[in-house]
């Protein structure tokens, strides 16, 4: 009997969330001073360069997203502890709702609003997405940046060629689709920002609202199955 894969662990879920990750990172880079919403490695590099070149006034814009990202990770841990009723993943719904609200607000904030405010909000929400959905069919992955995913794609392509083992082919397929989803998200963001500017964030919010409904449906399904088994 084939093992049932939880909704949060499915390939489609990983591809969708990685699309959102690419979309929002590109959104920040294009509209908000070139700062990354989720790729904190890039922001740390920017901080180092600013320090080395005495660009002290630029530091807060790079530092605040990093702090906000850390706060987002802590929020996920708190939600897991306090809202994980009967281990049914209800906490993910709370965090999705938070992310949707943040994106709706961001879509109202014009480019006249300081970039630091927007990038801080987005970094926190992207951290909750990254920490809430971290595996695809049991394989660890990242849905808000793609360096690690690309490394795993190349590794598994090589291992499949070298060993002919199907498990490596499957992993290569998964990570190839995930990397592709991130790339498509960045392209989509670039085109949409040219048309509707900051309101492009609302598309991400709308897509996440649909995703929220699907997560809710499958959560309710698990609750029903749990009740049935407990009788």
Image (tube, rainbow, N blue to C red):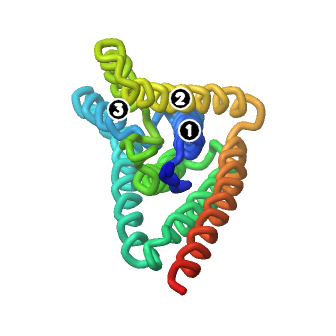
Q: Is residue 16 above or below residue 184?
A: below
Q: Determine if residue 28 is in view.
A: no
Q: Position of residue 155 (x, y in %)?
A: 32, 22
Cα gap from disc 2 to disc 1, whole angstroms = 7 Å
Q: Which mark is residue 100?
A: none
Q: Which mark is residue 148?
A: 3
Name the residue nearer the viewer: 23 or 91. 91
Q: Position of residue 201 (x, y in %)?
A: 66, 46
Judging by the rendered image, the residue that carries numbered circle 2 is 177
Tag 2 and tag 1, C-beta contact below 8 Å: yes
Q: Is residue 66 above or below residue 102?
A: above
Residue at the image position 36 percent from the left and 43 percent from the top: 140
Tag 3 and tag 2, C-beta contact below 8 Å: no
Which residue is most to the front? Answer: 1
Q: Is residue 199 left or right of residue 130?
A: right
Q: Position of residue 70 (x, y in %)?
A: 34, 56
Judging by the rendered image, the residue that carries numbered circle 1 is 15
């Amino acid at each position: 009997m084939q093992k049932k894969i939880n909704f949060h662990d499915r390939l489609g879920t990983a591809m969708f969330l990685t699309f959102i990750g690419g979309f929002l990172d590109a959104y920040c880079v294009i509209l908000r001073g070139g700062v990354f919403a989720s790729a904190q490695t890039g922001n740390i590099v920017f901080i180092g360069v600013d320090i080395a070149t005495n660009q002290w006034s630029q530091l807060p814009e790079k530092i605040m997203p990093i702090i906000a990202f850390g706060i987002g990770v802590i929020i996920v841990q708190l939600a897991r502890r306090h809202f994980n009723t009967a281990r049914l993943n209800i906490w993910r719904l709370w965090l999705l709702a938070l992310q949707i609200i943040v994106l709706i607000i961001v879509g109202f904030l014009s480019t006249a609003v300081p970039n630091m405010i927007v990038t801080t909000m987005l970094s926190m929400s992207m951290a909750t997405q990254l920490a809430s959905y971290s595996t695809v069919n049991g394989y660890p992955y990242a849905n808000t940046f793609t360096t690690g995913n690309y490394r795993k794609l190349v590794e598994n392509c090589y291992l499949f060629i070298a060993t002919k083992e199907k498990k490596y082919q499957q992993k290569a397929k998964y990570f190839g689709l995930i990397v592709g989803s991130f790339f498509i998200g960045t392209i989509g963001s670039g085109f949409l920002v040219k048309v509707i500017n900051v309101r492009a964030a609302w598309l991400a919010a709308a897509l996440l609202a649909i995703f929220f409904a699907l997560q809710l449906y499958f959560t309710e399904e698990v609750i029903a199955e749990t009740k049935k088994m407990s009788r």
